Structure formats: C-alpha cells, structure tokens
Image (spheres, rainbow, N blue to C red):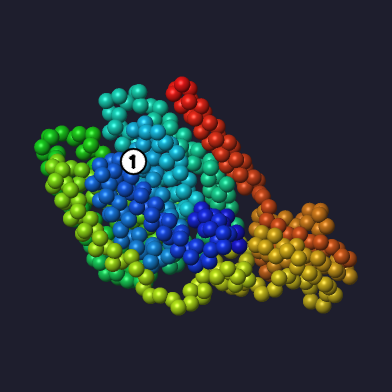
Amino acid sequence: MPLFEFYAPLPFYIGAAIFWSGIDVILVIKILYVLANIFTLLGAYFLGTRLFGRTGGWVTAAAYTLAPYRAVNLYIRGALSEAWAMMALPWVLLGIVLVVQKQKGGVWVLLAGLVTLLLSHNLTTLMFIPLSILFGAVYWLMYNWKHLKTALPQVFRLAGSYLLALGLSAFYIFPALAENSFTKIEQIFTGYFSYQNHFLYLRQFFIPNWGYGGSNWGPDDGISFFLGYGQLIGLALFGLLWIKRLFQQRRFTPQLVFYASLGGLLVSSVFMTLLRSKPIWDAIPLLLTIQFPWRWLSVGSLMLALLCGAGISLIPRKGTRLLLSVALILAILVNAQYFKPESYMEDPTGLYYTDPDKIERQMSQILPDYIPATMSDTQQPPTEKFLVPAGTEQHVELIIDRGSQKLFKTTFLTPVLFNPMIASFPGWKVEIDGQEVEWSSDGQQGTIAVEVPGGEHLVSVYFGDTPIRSASDTITLLSIIGLFGAATYVSLNSKRQRS
C-alpha cells in the first residue's frame, strides 16, 4: 500500500537515516521520541523567552513540554507524528516573532518550523496553520502599531515563508490531497472513527483520571484530557494579573491586546474539542478528517503554556517574578508522573520488527485505511508473491523484491495473464523486456494483471509518477532552487554591507 503517499514522512525519513547507520530499530524509535522532547523544550523556551523574558521562557517551556496531552501522545497513543508536529508548533511561532522583530535568521526558523509541521502530521497542520496566521497578524499589529506602513515588508516575508514552505513540501502535500480518493481513506471517518463520537466535556480538563485506554463517547474515556494543575494555576494567575494591569493602565495597550489574543486562541482550540462545537464540525466537511476533536489540545496546550509565561511577565517586581516562576514550575513538574509507560515488554520485537514479509502481512491489517480502493474490505494480505491461472505450465523466478519494485523472470509455453500480487494504484508501471505495456486491474483480487507472452521474458513492475506527482516534485525542486538562490543573495548582500 502507498503508505508514505499519505502518511507524513519526515520522522521516518530521519529514522531511516539513523537506521542505515547500523543502529537497532527499537533504539531508533526511542531516539525519534527523544528528539521530539528535546526540540519541544528548546522551541518553547526560545519562544517564551523572546515574548516574555527568561523567566517567562522557562515557565512556557515547562508548561508545554510537560503538558499532559504530550504524555498521552508519547506514552499512551505512541503518536510519533503528532509528537513531532507538536515539536514544530513553537518553532513556527518563534519564526513569526523573529521575522516581525526583524531578527537575523527569522525566516529560516519559520521555514524550518513550517516544513517540519507540514511533513510530520497533516491534521495538526490543518488545525494550526490558520491559528498561526492569526497569531502573526495580531503580533505584527501589536509590534508595529505606530508605524504600520513601514512594516509591510515583514508581511511579505511572512507570506513568502508560508508559500515557500508549501512549495518545499509540495512533493508530499499535493499528491496526498489529490490521490486519497484511490484509497479506503473514507472508512476512517465513519463508525468509531467519526468525530461525533469523540467530543469532550468541560469537566474532563480538570479531572486527572489518568488511564491507558482509548477514547469513547461520553465523559468516561479510557484516557485523560486533564490540562494539568500547574497549567491551570498559571492560567488563573495570568487572568488575575491581566485584569489588574488593565485596571491600572485603564486602557488596552498593545501588550494586553496581544495577550488577550493568546487567550482567544486558547478558548478557540479548547472549544473545538467540546460537544458545543458540533455545528461547526457539521458545517465544515474538511474537519471530519481530524477524526478526534480532542486533537485540538495539541494547539491548546501551546496556547495555555504561552499564557502561563505571559502571566509571569506581568509581575512587575523581579524578585516576586522569580519566586512565582519557581513555584509555578514546581507545580507543573507534578505532571512528570504521567510521562511513564504503562508496563515494560520483555521482548519488544513482537511490535517492532524489520522483516519485510512480516510488515507486509501485519501492517496491512493495522492500517487498512491506506489500502487501495480496488481491494475488498475482506481481502487478506497475500501470502503468494505472484499468481498465474491454475494448470498453467510455467516457471517464475522473483529476482528483485522491494516495496516499490518487483522483477520477475518468466517462462511460459503460451501467453499468460500474470498477476504480480501488487494492489492496483495510479503510478504503477509494467515493462516486459524493457518495453512498457498496459496493465489491467484484476477485479477479483484488486491487483495488477498483465498479459505476458509465451517464452522467456523479464517482467518489471515499479512504482512511478503520475501527473500530479511529477508537477509536485517540480514545484519542490524549484522551491529548493529558490531557497538556495535567496540564501546566496542574502549572504552576498551581507558581505557588501560589511565591506
């Protein structure tokens, strides 16, 4: 099945690179989770420091890195792609802040964050990109409210960064959007996986009923959606200090407006998890692809962490600010109890393995949503490497056996309808003795079938391009060229200014 046509590939590209160095696959998986934790902490710290000062940065980093929803993704759901997407979120906002502040390297930080997000998890991208644009608009207005006209180049840099990030990710994004109708993707939006079955109730944010189960209809889920006592204390502190500052200044300053916008983004994210938001989900068909409304907590956790940091920045006295920061971080550290596995396995190879045949058999049953639409729902993963009509006198030798390429040496007495047992999907090419031939879809198996003449022949089956894939690859290639061109221009311009 064309898994990486639809499943965001970046964590697995990096994992593959590490695996090729000879490291055990289980250790590779652990390294990928460790990287997610490290860069989540760093991104949240740098973002919080840039917005709220060093003490606010530490509080933001603690509140986001130790958000209970991150523990759910890491230790309960094992959601590597979502963990990487959450890692990218603070870097995207940090890039926006740096660009608006005209800091060197801001565009590169924003690009790196956006590309990491786009290539790590589609659904987090869908939720976060619109909110990041709102964040950027409010921050730009707040930062430049006295000289908006002269700050227009910042808007073009921000817009250009988003467009360039989309171009760099086009090789994956556009084919995934254009060709998902060729798979059974629609079945993951119905039944248990329908968004209607997974709305939260407000009280679930305040109850630390931790569990290692699953999500169900109603408030009694097997997993927790607790926001964290430390984070909730930080939110309450922010609210009190924000109101106090408003009464002291008797007007809405740009800082207070920006902080209020963070609160608005938090409320919006949390609201989208609640049953009361169902009319919005019903009205926007694209939202059904998110499946679980509680996924909005990935965005909400970041906004909540930022508000914790903002609250610290509103404390005027340095000593008091430092004391409350330490107290708040200690309260947040209580969440560390959630960052642990339910149990340990003596033999993890039952779940983590590299044998291609086992992957072929097992994963097709675990992820049926990516199986091509030509195959029936009851189709079992094939045990044969090829099929020919019963009673055919034949000799078939499988010379190359890869996920994206098969090479057979066939010897038939008469022409034979040969089935290489590959699910039919756009892009597959078949060559006989180096000449491309047409293939048809076997209606019974939902697989490729091709007429092979009698005699000895080499039959090659490989996964090639379609028009949308070729166009998307071209866009990515041009974006890479544009990226290097821009980097060269900036470098040369900096040298001229120094000289």
Q: Is residue 461 above or below residue 477?
A: below
Pick whichever, 165 or 50, lies toward us.
50
Where residue 53 appears, x then y in whole percent? 25, 42
Q: Is residue 361 above or below residue 148?
A: below
Where residue 60 appears, x then y in whole percent? 28, 50
Pick whichever, 483 or 130, lies toward us.
483
Pick whichever, 409 or 364, lies toward us.
409
Callout 1 amino acid = Phe
Where residue 389 appears, x then y in whole percent? 79, 73
Circle 1 SS class = helix
Q: Is residue 249 left or right of residue 5?
A: left
Q: Residue at x 78, y 69 (%)?
A: 397
Classify residue 107 by image quadrant.
Answer: top left
Graded by Cα atoms within 10 Å as few (under 14), some (14 to 19) or many (20 or more), the crowding at tag 1 reads: some
Q: Residue at x 65, y 72 (%)?
A: 382
Q: Residue at x 46, y 54 (%)?
A: 121
- The quarter of the rendered structure image containing the N terminus is bottom right
Residue 445 seen anywhere in this rendered image of the structure: yes
Where residue 444 appears, x then y in whole percent? 69, 69
Q: Is residue 460 left or right of residue 402?
A: right
Q: Residue at x 38, y 67 (%)?
A: 76
Q: Is residue 93 above or below residue 216?
A: above
Q: Which residue is mark 1?
A: 135
Classify residue 83 by image quadrant.
Answer: bottom left
The extreme left residue here reads 248
Residue 265 seen anywhere in this rendered image of the structure: no
